[in-house]
């Protein structure tokens, strides 16, 4: 038990003693602390007009459905330099409305991809978070081979520094393709780097349905990852999200969002796509628990 819980327990003990002297054990029982679970998670689905992974278009016909599940176990929480630490487990899938990405072994399958992985997260110095994740994927539709990668995300939470409702949320992702039958990028055993910012403003912050309007800007970089061209893409576009606070918390914390990203593709991705730009539309709904 961490030291920051001791004053609270001492106060509870004193209250219990006082209630005991009054001759009412029932009163003493009412001040017992409520234990908070170390486990949390999120279940959701993203609907998009294409399967776009780091500027590389896997599927651009019809509609793609991407259900996911994230589970977290908080191992530590404190007020020192390290603020929290947790372990993470994730599942992710891509299911297409058409069967274009299906191999001879499973012709006609809509189940393009299935991913699973483990990670860890550490928050420190109040505003910094480092996430690491190891991911493996397979294609149930036999559209491509298996593969795996590892990544690390460093993010900074500047909420409240400039305005109570505004933040920029800068981040950088570093990914390493670990080989396998298929690669994450255009070449195996390559590095990918993604710097980005997400300037955003929250309207109606104290209501049951606060609206967050953001403008996401990110770039995909990596010489070998993009087959010799360092610049993979530059993407930017608006994102609108809201919490559905009118839903009873007993059923979880519900959120929904819509977004658009315009992609300016580099010289390596342009001939693969057949044009130098791309448009990604997304809708997401999720429940946290």
Image (cartoon, rainbow, N blue to C red):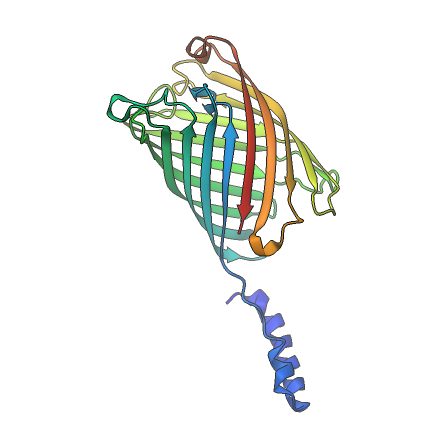
Looking at the image, can residue 53 be seen? no
Q: Quadrant of residue 78?
A: bottom right
Residue 204 position by quadrant: top right
159 with respect to 231 (left or right): right
Question: Viewed as shown, does residue 114 lie left or right of 154?
Answer: left
Q: What is the quadrant of residue 240 in the picture? A: top right
Q: Position of residue 13 (x, y in %)?
A: 61, 79
Q: Is residue 48 visible?
A: yes
Looking at the image, residue 268 lies above or below residue 240: above
Residue at 53 percent across and 31 percent down: it is: 172
Number of numbered discs overlaid on the protein picture: 0
Identify which residue, 9 or 259, lies in the foreground: 259
Q: Measuring 34% from the left and 20% from the top, which residue is drawn there?
A: 187
Up-down relation of residue 199 to residue 89 (above or below): above
Residue 134, percent across and down? 38, 39
Residue at 45%, 43% in the rendered image:
69
Residue at 59 percent of width and 24 percent of height: 260
Image coordinates of residue 195 in percent, x first then y, are: 54, 27
Percent from the top left, x then y, of residue 280?
A: 54, 22
């Amino acid at each position: 038990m961490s030291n920051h819980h001791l004053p609270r327990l001492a106060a509870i003990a004193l209250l219990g003693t006082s209630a005991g002297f009054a001759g009412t054990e029932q009163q003493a029982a009412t001040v017992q602390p409520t234990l908070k679970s170390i486990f949390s998670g999120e279940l959701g689905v993203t609907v998009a007009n294409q399967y776009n992974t780091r500027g590389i278009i896997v599927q651009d016909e019809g509609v793609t459905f991407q259900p996911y599940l994230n589970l977290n176990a908080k191992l530590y929480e404190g007020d020192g330099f390290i603020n929290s630490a947790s372990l993470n487990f994730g599942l992710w899938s891509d299911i297409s409305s058409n069967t274009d990405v299906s191999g001879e072994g499973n012709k006609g399958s809509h189940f393009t991809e299935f991913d699973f992985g483990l990670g860890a997260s550490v928050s420190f110095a109040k505003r910094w978070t480092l996430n690491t994740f190891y991911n493996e994927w397979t294609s149930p539709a036999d559209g491509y081979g298996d593969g795996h990668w590892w990544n690390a995300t460093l993010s900074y939470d500047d909420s409240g520094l400039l305005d109570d409702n505004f933040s920029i949320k800068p981040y950088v992702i570093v990914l390493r393709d670990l080989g396998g039958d298929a690669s994450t990028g255009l070449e195996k055993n390559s590095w990918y780097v993604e710097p980005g910012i997400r300037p955003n403003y929250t309207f109606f912050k104290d209501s049951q349905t606060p609206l967050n309007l953001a403008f996401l800007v990110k770039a995909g970089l990596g010489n070998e990852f993009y087959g010799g061209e360092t610049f993979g893409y530059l993407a930017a576009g608006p994102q609108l999200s809201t919490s559905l606070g009118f839903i009873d918390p007993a059923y979880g914390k519900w959120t929904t969002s819509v977004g658009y990203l315009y992609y300016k593709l580099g010289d390596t991705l342009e001939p693969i796509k057949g044009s130098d730009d791309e448009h990604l539309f997304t809708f997401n709904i999720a429940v946290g628990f």
